[in-house]
Image (cartoon, grey):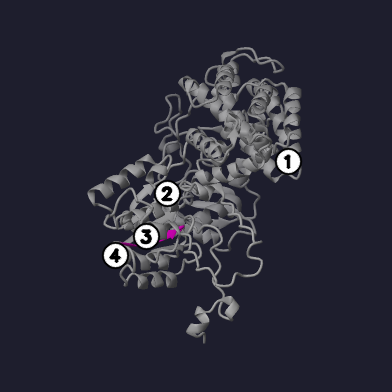
């Protein structure tokens, strides 16, 4: 037990030592400076020699954290709504803030907590959208020591027991402030049971209670929770706003930055103020003499290539100039650019060019750098949307390959080689139009064949590999009461008997069909009661009793074998077609994938020819048969 005398006694008197001052700021800023202790009667040894300790460094993301609604950048709709709510006294009891990391969700929650509890410099103020920051309530919240502002990280306190503890705290009125505020960060991490336990408290909270939920994954928050909150979606901050903000922060820190450096930091931040300030902090540490943040230093720090260099590579590969493209890529690699980042930048520029080619008016966007706008507009005028779309798909697939490749530089160079190889090749749609119109083939291609005869041509599908046969359609066979072919028998099982249909398709050789009798040869892997199953199916579908006889005769090929043989015949015939040969010559390495004919049935077979009908009457030249000419019966 510690006596009152021990507590009052100083360290020299054998009592407990004084608690050390806080090291640096709290989560919300600097704490209030403690009141100076009375000077001891006897100065401690070497007191005069002790030097003042420098204040610990505060990272920019904390130092420039917004303290009021006016400091929030890029969230005008949110600020306007909350200001109106405070002005009219219509502040909701539960808020749900969503958005990507670093856009100000938790910061906004803390500003709302101060606005609800601010009492003004004179101690008589009420809730306000402009907290003073000087009253005891504001100071305590800024120092992260207010007993009525409870912040809980739902990622590490996600169970039902944690929510029950929170609900227990709701029973007590605010200990110091006007409003008790519960801030639940990353609320989507709560378990289903925890969400259910929170529902009733969110819907009907006790007086003087406010909930503020924050999440980066709104879709993971149950609809029942969202319906009980006012939801605000915090937007990504535009690059132009981030550039201006980072320039202002650098100036306040006593540094200057090149415009290209600020632009690279803003792009890398991806709409997040906190991420951008962390990168700016790192860039300032790299600043050379004179306190200038140079673009070259930021480029090396981020592992990026010069945007002009990337555009040179893109122009080279789209023109088929592979030596120039590889030379520029080697230069970027020597500067420390990551191959993955280079291809990502090229993908971004292909997207920009595609937008220019699709919507020319976008070339005048003022937010684009002058160099990219001029060069991009000129390159987009020479390229078509299909060509750019093909480059986009190849780069998208190439980025995945580079990410998984053991040698990222070699993988990136292979992507550039592919792009340059196909640069001068027309798209499948262009070459098809030339072939169908009888026009000339591109350089290096096969000569264009004569147009196919009407009704018998083949049309190449996208990619030049899949073809569709389009002869004149033939009329479907007339339906009959009983199936007249083995194919029609098998088709009866395709609807509701998938297993029986598979066995009939692959394991049965038809021998003879004479409705209502069928002779079949069954393979050993077929079920032993296949004949009984088939008889039951035919009787159910046709209303007639059928006889299924098992035979040892070879019979015809199975329906699957017939389908495979017909497919081979179609592929062989298609491969000899002049247009197909021209397409295969125009696209080296292309193969004939499949041949489709709209007139074929589900088994890939042509409709069976109808049986000739017997005449109802004898032909005019037939010799009549009389009763006396008929053979006598025995």
Nearer to us of marks 4 and 2 is 2
- Which one is nearer the viewer's eye here, 271 or 451? 271
Label 3 sits on residue:
136
Q: Which mark is residue 205?
A: 4
Q: Are marks 2 and 1 in contact (CB under 8 Å)?
A: no
Nearer to us of marks 4 and 1 is 4
Relative image position of residue 591 (x, y in whole percent) = 68, 32
Q: Is residue 435 magenta?
A: no
Number of numbered callouts drawn: 4
- Region of the chain picked out in magenta, as a range: 178-186
Nearer to us of marks 4 and 3 is 3
Q: Is residue 608 visible?
A: no
- Mark nearer the N terminus (4 vs 3): 3
- Mark nearer the N terminus (2 vs 3): 2
Q: CA gap, disc 2 to disc 1?
A: 45 Å
Relative image position of residue 231 (x, y in whole percent) = 35, 50
Relative image position of residue 478 (x, y in whole percent) = 42, 36
- Which one is nearer the viewer's eye here, 370 or 216? 370
Label 4: which secondary element: loop
Disc 2 crowd rating (10 Å Cα; few below 14, some 14-19, many 20+) is many
- Mark nearer the N terminus (3 vs 1): 3
Q: CA gap, disc 4 to disc 3?
A: 26 Å
Q: Is residue 110 above or below residue 394?
A: below
Q: Is residue 533 visible?
A: yes
Q: CA gap, disc 3 to disc 1?
A: 57 Å
Q: Residue at x 50, y 68 (%)?
A: 38
Q: Is residue 289 above or below residue 189?
A: above
Q: Are marks 4 and 2 in contact (CB under 8 Å)?
A: no
**Farthest-out residue, left:** 88
Label 2 sits on residue:
67
């Amino acid at each position: 037990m510690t006596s009152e005398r021990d507590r009052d006694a100083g360290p020299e008197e054998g009592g407990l030592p004084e608690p050390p001052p806080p090291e640096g700021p709290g989560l919300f800023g600097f704490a209030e400076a403690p009141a100076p202790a009375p000077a001891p009667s006897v100065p401690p040894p070497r007191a005069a020699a002790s030097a003042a300790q420098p204040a610990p460094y505060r990272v920019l993301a904390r130092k420039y954290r917004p303290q009021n609604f006016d400091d929030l950048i890029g969230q005008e709709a949110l600020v306007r709504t909350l200001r109106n709510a405070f002005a009219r006294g219509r502040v909701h009891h539960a808020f749900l803030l969503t958005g990507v990391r670093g856009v100000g969700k938790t910061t906004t929650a803390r500003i709302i907590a101060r606005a609800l509890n601010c009492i003004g410099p004179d101690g008589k103020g009420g809730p306000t959208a402009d907290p003073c920051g000087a009253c005891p309530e504001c100071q305590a919240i800024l120092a992260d020591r207010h007993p009525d502002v409870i912040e809980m990280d739902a990622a590490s306190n996600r169970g039902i027991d944690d929510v029950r503890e929170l609900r227990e705290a709701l029973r007590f009125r605010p200990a110091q402030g006007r409003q008790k505020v519960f801030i639940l960060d990353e609320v989507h991490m709560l378990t289903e049971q925890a969400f259910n336990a929170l529902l009733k408290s969110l819907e009907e909270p006790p007086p003087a209670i406010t909930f503020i939920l924050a999440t980066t994954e709104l879709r993971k928050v149950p609809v029942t929770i969202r319906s009980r909150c006012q939801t605000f979606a915090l937007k990504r901050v535009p690059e132009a706003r981030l550039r201006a903000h980072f320039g202002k922060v650098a100036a306040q820190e006593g540094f200057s930055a090149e415009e290209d450096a600020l632009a690279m930091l803003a792009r890398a931040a991806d709409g997040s103020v906190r991420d951008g300030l962390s990168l700016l902090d790192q860039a300032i540490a790299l600043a050379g003499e004179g306190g200038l943040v140079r673009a070259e230093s930021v480029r090396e720090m981020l592992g990026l290539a010069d945007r002009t260099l990337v555009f040179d590579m893109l122009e080279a590969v789209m023109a088929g100039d592979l030596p120039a493209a590889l030379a520029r890529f080697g230069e970027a690699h020597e500067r420390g650019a990551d191959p993955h980042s280079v291809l990502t930048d090229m993908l971004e520029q292909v997207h920009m060019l595609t937008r220019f080619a699709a919507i020319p008016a976008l070339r005048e966007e003022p937010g684009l750098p002058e160099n990219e706008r001029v060069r991009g507009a000129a390159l987009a005028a020479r390229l078509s949307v299909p060509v750019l779309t093909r480059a986009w798909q190849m780069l998208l697939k190439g980025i995945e390959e580079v990410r998984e490749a053991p040698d990222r530089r070699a993988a990136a160079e292979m992507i550039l080689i592919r792009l340059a190889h196909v640069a001068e090749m027309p798209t499948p749609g262009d070459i098809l139009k030339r072939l169908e119109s009888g026009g000339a083939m591109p350089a290096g291609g096969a000569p264009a064949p004569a147009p196919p005869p009407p009704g018998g041509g083949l049309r190449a599908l996208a990619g030049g590999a899949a073809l569709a046969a389009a002869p004149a359609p033939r009329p479907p066979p007339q339906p009959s009461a009983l199936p007249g072919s083995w194919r029609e028998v098998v088709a009866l099982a395709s609807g509701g008997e998938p297993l029986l249909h598979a066995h009939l398709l692959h394991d049965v050789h038809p021998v003879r069909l004479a409705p209502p009798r069928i002779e079949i040869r069954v393979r050993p892997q077929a079920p032993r009661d296949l004949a009984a199953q088939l008889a039951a199916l035919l009787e159910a579908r046709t209303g007639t009793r059928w006889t299924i006889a098992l035979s040892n005769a070879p019979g015809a090929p199975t329906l699957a074998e017939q389908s495979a043989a017909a497919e081979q015949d179609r592929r062989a015939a298609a491969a000899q077609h002049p247009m197909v040969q021209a397409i295969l010559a125009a696209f080296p390495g292309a193969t004939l994938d499949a041949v489709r004919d709209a007139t074929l049935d589900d088994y890939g077979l042509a409709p069976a020819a109808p049986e000739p009908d017997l005449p109802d009457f004898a032909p005019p030249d037939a010799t009549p048969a009389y009763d006396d000419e008929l053979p006598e019966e025995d």
